[in-house]
Image (spheres, rainbow, N blue to C red):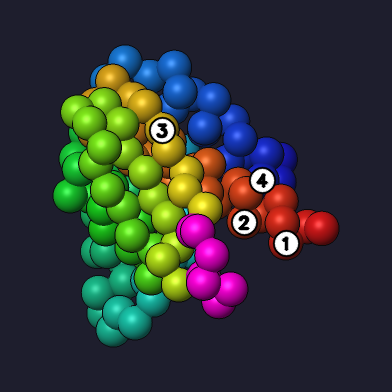
Amino acid sequence: MTELEQCKSVLADLEKAGGADPRLDHAISEIFSHLNSDGLPTGFLQQFRVVWQKTPWTASLDATIALVERVLPGWEWIRKSPGTMTVYDPDIPEKTWAVHYDARGATPPLALLTALFRAKIAQMEKADG
């Protein structure tokens, strides 16, 4: 399964999720595992990998915000309502309206994760041509 297919599969699960889900947390950690060690001293890498694999992305808004900042550097996020979040790139060279990726979810972390995956999938599809 390609990374794009994995992202689409996780997105489908996020859109159906009713709350925190350790299975989804693990799938998210696997997709973005290449981000987990940037800039860390070698001695901390193994310990960090263990923590990364156990991060409760679907339960923690703080963890999800940190993930957005790593996956979409420079992008911003906002909470539109209790169950609606959006991510967007405020640094558009053409100075036109930024593309927003909105999402609803049962909880704020699920909504923000869903918006994150929609944006990431769009980036990947654009890169594929």
Which of the two discs, 1 and 4, labels the residue nearer the N terminus? Answer: 4
Badge 3: few (under 14), some or many (20 or more) residues near its Cα, within 10 Å?
many
Disc 1 packing (10 Å; few <14; some 14–19; many ≥20)? few
Q: CA distance from mark 3 to mark 4?
A: 19 Å
Q: Is residue 119 depicted above or below 13 in this figure?
A: below
Q: Nearer the viewer, residue 34 or 94?
A: 94
Amino acid type at mark 4:
Leu
Q: Residue 126, how many percent across, how many down? A: 72, 56
Q: Nearer the viewer, mark 1 or mark 4?
A: 1
Q: How many marks?
A: 4
Q: Are marks 1 and 4 in contact (CB under 8 Å)?
A: no
Secondary structure under tag 1 reads helix
The residue that label 4 is drawn on is: 4
Q: Are marks 1 and 2 in contact (CB under 8 Å)?
A: yes
Q: Give the residues in magenta.
A: 92-98
Residue highlighted by disc 1: 127
Asked if residue 37 lies left or right of residue 129, the reply is: left
Tell me the mark number nearer the camera, choosing from 1 and 3: 3
Residue carrying label 3: 103
> Which amino acid does the dot numbered 1 rest on?
Ala
- Which label was assigned to residue 18? none
Q: Secondary structure at mark 3?
A: strand
**Residue 37 x, y percent position in the rendering:** 37, 71
Q: Earlier in the sequence, mark 3 or mark 4?
A: 4
- Is 118 positioned to the left or the right of 39 in the image? right
